[in-house]
Every structure is written in structure tokens, then in C-alpha cells.
Amino acid sequence: MRDPPASPRCSLQCYNSRMTFMTMTYELQSPLKQEQLRALASFANTYGLQKFRIDEHKNLLHFDYDASRLKETEVEHVLRMAKIPVVGRVSMN
């Protein structure tokens, strides 16, 4: 069940205090095409997906999301929907 929308009087600080930010990193099979970048941008800042960054030199995609709202499998589902050619998740330890 999703939380009801915040009231207009609720500040961003109120909303952010309940969020748990996580970053997932994926290795890409190939550089992203314009339509794939547009698909990623359309998902950013919705459903708890915050932003993404692409490291073109290392061929990596970093995806920030709100783990209090989404599971890792849901993030991976979004990437599949956007037809993002990921090889797999990369540990950034």
C-alpha cells in the first residue's frame, strides 16, 4: 500500500525523512542509445526512482532509488521496461 500524497503544507523535509536512499550499479552491454536515455529519464523521479548517472568510460549505470518504496527487483523491472542492456549488477565495495 502506498502512502497518501503529502499535503501541500508538508515540506520536502517531511517527505525525505522517511526515505532510504540506495544506489544500484549495473554493467551495460553497450552504450545507451538516445531512446534508452529518454526512457530512463521518463522513469527518473517517479515511483521512488531518484536519478541515474552513466559512466561512459567504465560502461556503468548508477541508479539511485528510495528503498523504502521499491525493491531491487522493481528497479530491475523498470530497466527491462526501458530496454536497457544490462549485463548484471556490479558490487561497488
Image: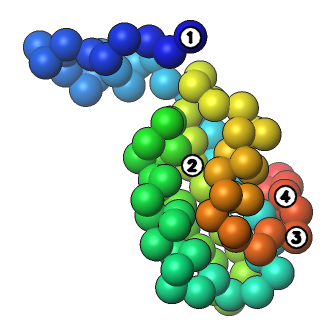
From the image, tell me which residue sits under label 2.
64
- Whether tag 4 and tag 3 are in contact, CB under 8 A, the answer is no
- Amino acid type for the residue under numbered disc 1: Met
What residue appears at the point 44 percent right and 12 percent down from the top-left corner? 3
From the image, tell me which residue sits under label 1.
1
Secondary structure of residue under mark 4: strand
Q: Earlier in the sequence, mark 4 or mark 2?
A: 2
Q: Distance between the residues labelled 1 and 4?
A: 28 Å
- Whether tag 4 and tag 2 are in contact, CB under 8 A, the answer is no
What residue appears at the point 63 percent right and 64 percent down from the top-left corner? 82
From the image, tell me which residue sits under label 3.
87
- Amino acid type for the residue under numbered disc 3: Val
User: Where does residue 29 sit, x and y in percent of width and height?
Assistant: 82, 81
Q: Along the horizontal axis of the image, is 86 left or right of 57? A: right
Q: Along the horizontal axis of the image, is 50 left or right of 8? A: right
Q: Which of marks 2 and 3 is nearer the N terminus?
A: 2
Q: Which of marks 1 and 4 is nearer the N terminus?
A: 1
User: Where does residue 89 sit, x and y in percent of width and height?
Assistant: 84, 58
- Amino acid type for the residue under numbered disc 4: Arg
User: Where does residue 28 sit, x and y in percent of width and height?
Assistant: 77, 76
- Amino acid type for the residue under numbered disc 2: Asp
From the image, tell me which residue sits under label 4.
89
